[in-house]
Image (cartoon, rainbow, N blue to C red):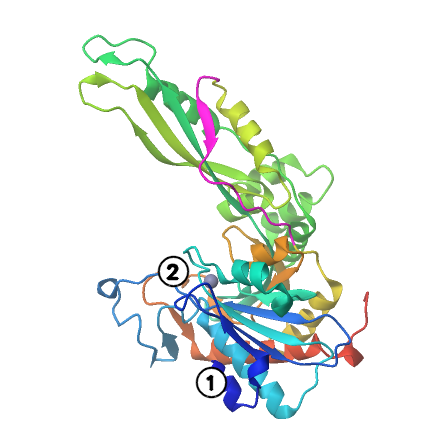
């Protein structure tokens, strides 16, 4: 990428390549603007999820075009956006476009895992290189169903990943002489209590906008319920019906669910230990300590210890920036007429959390559409439609230009 940028006329001082070691490189390239406004950061990660060739029908690490799709590990997550941002930066340079702010492209390491996260590293070591008014990132994108474009998603926030370990101890003994106190029964009762518990509904600016805009796409009872939960207080029957959809339930509230279980040490012994892993996905803005307290109340057994598995890395939600949303609406209508823009909260995580924590609001948006029933990121035979790739390139080309041209910007409308 650095070589291509140099060949397009970017000078060495505007291309930074570095990282904690040679295998964990990050690239930051800047197209200088007039400096009227704080820079715009365009972020994509270079690393990919592991892929075992024997699991795939084709070589996961060989880029191929087959029947209108680009196939390869990373083709959709997230090399498409990285390629698009660099190609568009070169296109602006060739046009001699002078944005009203610096446009910064950052391609980074270890989003999917590993201990050399590039965004974290850049923020700690070279903050000035990527400091921006706000950033565009993965995490959004368009949804298609049966070839029809349904919505263009903009990710505003992410839930926070936090697991807890429940543990109960017992003195144990010979299983030929059982007693009523039993570590496995005790843990099972606590888990049954948890299974009946729901965290309170807590909508924020972004998830309210999600349900409001979704209510215009859906019809019938579902659309009515989406409107009814926006009342204060939310309509309880509507909450109950929407809670039956896992994705809407996870959008309305923090969730904690049992994911792993172990106990006992021998077939013929009373268990001395039983443990369970509870995986929570905490709403942005809610305190993990408060969630732990509520979890302890829900399981309702003071003999069971509750400890965090790893410290959570909470990040705030990005505000609905009117300029950003206006421009996303405008470009969406130009390229995909009548497709609504819908703000979303991801139940998974991206590197946006590091930026949001560093006061750089981050918007997950790409204009790259994929079928809702054909999501292959992190899975086998990952692919992206060739047409979707080039549509996304044009979408981001126009959007970034709109966001860096003062004359076309009216604040607060
Ligand atoms: Zn990704």
Marks 2/1: CA–CA distance? 29 Å
Q: Nearer the viewer, residue 260 or 218?
A: 260
Over which residues does the magenta segment extend?
Answer: 302-317
Q: Quadrant of the C terminus?
A: bottom right
Residue 326 sits inside the magenta stretch: no
Q: Position of residue 131 (x, y in %)?
A: 65, 65
Q: Position of 211 compared to 198: left or right? A: right
Q: Position of residue 270 (x, y in %)?
A: 25, 16
Label at residue 378: 2
The residue indicated by pointer 1 is 3
Q: Nearer the viewer, residue 368 or 40?
A: 40
Q: Position of 210 compared to 392: left or right? A: right
State which quadrant residue 278 falls in. top left
Q: Label 1 crowding class (10 Å Cα cut-off): few <14, some 14-19, many 20+? A: few
Residue 305 sits inside the magenta stretch: yes
Q: Position of residue 381 (x, y in %)?
A: 32, 67
Number of numbered discs overlaid on the protein picture: 2
Q: Residue at x 50, y 90 (%)?
A: 7
Q: In what element is the residue under mark 1?
A: helix
Q: Position of 144 compared to 229: left or right? A: left
């Amino acid at each position: 990428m650095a070589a291509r940028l140099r060949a397009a006329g970017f000078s060495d001082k505007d291309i930074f390549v570095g990282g904690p070691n040679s295998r964990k490189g990050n690239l930051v390239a800047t197209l200088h603007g007039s400096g009227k406004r704080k820079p715009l950061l365009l972020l994509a990660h270079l690393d990919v999820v592991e892929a075992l060739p024997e699991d795939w029908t084709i070589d996961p690490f060989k880029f191929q075009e087959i029947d209108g799709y680009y196939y390869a590990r990373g083709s959709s997550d997230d090399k498409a956006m990285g390629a698009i941002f660099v190609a568009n930066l070169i296109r602006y340079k060739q046009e001699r476009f002078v944005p009203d702010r610096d446009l910064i492209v950052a391609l980074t390491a270890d989003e999917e895992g590993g201990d050399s996260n590039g965004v974290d590293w850049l923020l700690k070591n070279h903050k000035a290189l990527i400091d921006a008014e706000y950033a565009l990132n993965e995490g959004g994108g368009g949804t298609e169903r049966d070839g029809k474009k349904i919505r263009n998603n903009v990710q505003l926030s992410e839930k926070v990943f936090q697991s807890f370990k429940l543990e109960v101890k017992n003195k144990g003994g010979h299983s030929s002489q059982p007693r009523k106190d039993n570590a496995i029964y005790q843990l099972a009762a606590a888990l049954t209590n948890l299974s009946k518990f729901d965290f309170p509904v807590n909508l924020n600016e972004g998830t309210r906008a999600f349900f409001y805009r979704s209510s215009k796409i859906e019809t019938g009872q579902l659309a009515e319920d989406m409107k009814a939960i926006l009342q204060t207080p939310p309509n309880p029957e509507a909450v109950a019906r929407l809670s039956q959809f896992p994705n809407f339930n996870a959008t309305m509230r923090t969730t904690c669910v049992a994911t792993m279980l172990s106990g006992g040490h021998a077939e013929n012994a009373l268990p001395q230990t039983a443990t369970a892993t509870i995986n929570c996905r905490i709403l942005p803005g809610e305190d993990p300590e408060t969630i732990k307290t509520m979890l302890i109340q829900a399981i309702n057994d003071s003999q069971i210890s509750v400890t965090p598995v790893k410290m959570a890395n909470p990040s705030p939600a990005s505000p609905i920036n009117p300029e950003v949303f206006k421009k996303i609406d405008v470009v969406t209508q130009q390229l995909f007429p009548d497709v609504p823009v819908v703000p979303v909260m991801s139940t998974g995580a991206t590197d946006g959390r590091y930026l949001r924590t560093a006061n750089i609001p981050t918007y997950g948006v790409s204009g790259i559409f994929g079928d809702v029933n054909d999501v292959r990121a992190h899975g086998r035979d990952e692919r992206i439609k060739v047409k979707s790739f080039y549509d996304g390139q044009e979408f981001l080309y126009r959007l970034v230009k709109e966001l860096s041209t003062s004359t076309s910007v009216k604040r607060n409308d």
